[in-house]
Image (cartoon, rainbow, N blue to C red):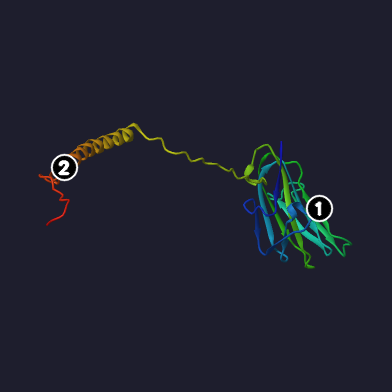
Amino acid sequence: MNQITVDDTNTSAIHYYGSWIQEGQDGEYNSTTHASGGPGVQMMFQFTGTFVEVYGTIGVQGINTSFVLDDGSQTGYTSTYYVVGSISRVMMQVSYYQSPSLPNIGHSLLMTVNDPSATTVFLDYIRYNTTYADTSSMTSSASASVITVTATAPVPSSANSSRTGFIVGIAVAVTVPLAIAALIVWFFMRRFRRPKHPISVFSGTIC
């Protein structure tokens, strides 16, 4: 048997009709509640299980609300939670409604705020028992997974290595003959620049 707690903020599981205000304070479940905005507003909760219980906060002005489970035809399927008058202190996580033992099938619970004295209902959370792992209504926290990606330098392929060697070979084949040709040209140019006859240098006195 699984016991599942549904927080008042889980609006995918708890459906609110009419004017409701998001409130909350320390001491309440997850420090949150839904406060009724006036008489006649409703809350609907559907579940599959064998037991359901509704919790809330009672303010200093009291509370007046009623519950109908399924069609209300069975004993304990209807209930009124009524507390009026001046309350000395705020009471939190108080059980508004407890169902009798139920067949493990689908059920719907309707809560109606019927406080003519304008008291406020503070819905805190709903808890129910089920044999199913109904994770859609469970309160949970999601943890983010951090993925670390390490970049590595690409390894050159054999095709790239072959291409590089081919280019280097061409460069050597072209450069070496050019260097030899330039050396030959330089040698002959230097040879042709030498004078064919030696220049006589006169040393003495002309009379």
Residue visible at 25% across and 36% down? 172
Q: Crowdedness of circle 2 by 10 Å Cα count: few (<14), some, many (20+)?
A: few
Label 1 Cα crowd, 10 Å radius (few <14 / some 14-19 / many 20+): some
Residue 77 shown left or right of residue 15 in the figure: right
- Considering depth in this image, is 158 or 68 the residue closer to the camera? 158
Farthest left residue in view: 196
- Tag 1's secondary structure? strand
Please give the residue where the numbered disc 1 appears in the rendered image.
94
Q: Which residue is mark 2?
A: 185
Left of 151 or right of it: where is 45?
right
Amino acid type assigned to the residue bearing label 2 in the image = Val
Q: Nearer the viewer, residue 86 or 155?
A: 155
Q: Position of residue 126 (x, y in %)?
A: 72, 49
Compared with residue 198, is residue 8 higher up or lower down, i.e. above or below?
A: below
Say which quadrant the C terminus sits in.
bottom left
Name the mark nearer the viewer: 2 or 1: 2
Q: Position of residue 178 (x, y in %)?
A: 20, 40
Quarter location, residue 110: bottom right
